[in-house]
Image (tube, helix red, strand yellow):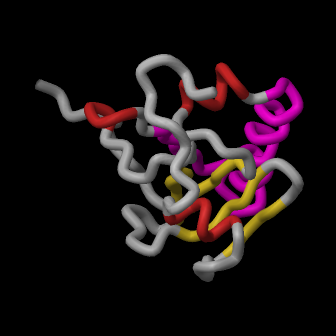
Amino acid sequence: MPVSGLPPYDDANIFARILRGEIPAKTVFEDEWALAFHDIAPQAPVHVLIIPRGKYCSFADFTAQGSEAEIGGFFRAVGAVARQMGLEAPGYRILANMGEHGGQEVPHFHVHLFGGRSLGRMVPAG
């Protein structure tokens, strides 16, 4: 059951199709909790998307409906990908968009991992 005010999970979204193997992805990490792959339109030298294997439409849905094992396993996977990509020493950014105002484009919870250069301010001043 989705979180109040959120749409139900859409099995036709692109990340669901990637998880089912219907669409190829350049995978960099996978375990029982998460799948990580390169973004097809990278915004930094390293731009990896990390998605949970469960059917969660957003961060709100994931944190409300996911088990402690799923949530913990997912965020451990995010850390593992950052280490694997060699981003810990120079630094990196993790970004999760939520809803229309947050700029979420795919209705499957995911985080973006950015690195490989100085990323500047997160939100423009003003």
> Residue shown at 88%/31% (left/top)?
69
The location of residue 71, given as percent across then percent down, is 77, 31
Regarding residue 73, the answer to whether it shows in the image is yes
Q: Quadrant of the C terminus?
A: top left
Q: Nearer the viewer, residue 26 or 104?
A: 104
The location of residue 41, given as percent across then percent down, is 39, 71
Compared across the picture, whether 125 is left or right of 44 comes to: left
The location of residue 49, given as percent across then percent down, is 57, 58
Q: Nearer the viewer, residue 43 or 24?
A: 24
Compared across the picture, whether 34 is left or right of 99 comes to: right
Residue 121 image-quadrant placement: top left
Q: Quadrant of the N terminus?
A: top right
Compared across the picture, whether 73 is left or right of 6 comes to: right
> Residue shown at 65%/20% (left/top)?
64
Q: Magenta stretch: residue 66 in it?
A: no
Farthest residue, direction left: 126
41 to 80, vertically: above or below: below
* Magenta range: 67-96
